Image (cartoon, rainbow, N blue to C red):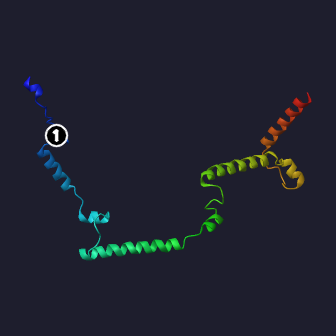
Amino acid sequence: MADENKPTVDETPISPSRPYPERKNSLEKLLTNRPSPDELKQKNILPNSSAAPAIQAQQKELDKHMRADSLNEKIAHRPSPDELRQKNILPDTSAAPALQAQQKELQKHMRADSLNEKIAHRPSPEELIKEGVLQDDPRSPEEKYAEAIEDEYAKREGGA
């Protein structure tokens, strides 16, 4: 019964780890596969400079200012929103941004409807030949024959 009052101690390690020899071998493996300083310089992990460490900080600051100046120059010469609208890069709309996608979708459907309407009412090749727009019928003989048969069936069904 004395064992029941005794607090139990959890002996498991906080983090699972390998025994010391395995950890040592693992560290040695990692150190042998360690990248060289040249590789680290190519990946911009180490500074790529042969200058003295005291000058490297100034060189880094100078590079930062040069990049900032370059960006400011590019921003100063970028086109205005009006120019971008004229080139159809920005949408020419006064709608709220939340509605612009719906507006674009509506315009797309309206264009499709307009094209379908125009296609439905376009003149036939015979009409274009009569008006002098076309010189010859652009359809193949098979297409002409198929249309003639359809017309004949339509006449028979309508006349019967």
| 34, 11: nearer the viewer | 11
| Residue topped by disc 1 | 13
Horizontal side, residue 91 vs residue 125: left or right:
left
Residue under the image location 11 percent in, 25 percent down: 4
Residue 10 in which image quadrant = top left
- Residue 85, position as x, y percentages in the image: 64, 64
Residue under the image location 18 percent in, 51 percent down: 29
Name of the residue lying farthest toward the top: 1
Residue 46 in which image quadrant = bottom left
- Residue 80, position as x, y percentages in the image: 59, 69
Horizontal side, residue 42 vs residue 32: left or right:
right
| 68, 9: nearer the viewer | 9
Residue under the image location 76 percent in, 49 percent down: 114
- Residue 54, position as x, y percentages in the image: 25, 76
| Amino acid of disc 1 | Pro
| 126, 41: nearer the viewer | 41
Residue 42 in which image quadrant = bottom left
- Residue 128, position as x, y percentages in the image: 85, 51
Name above or below for residue 109 compared with residue 48. Answer: above
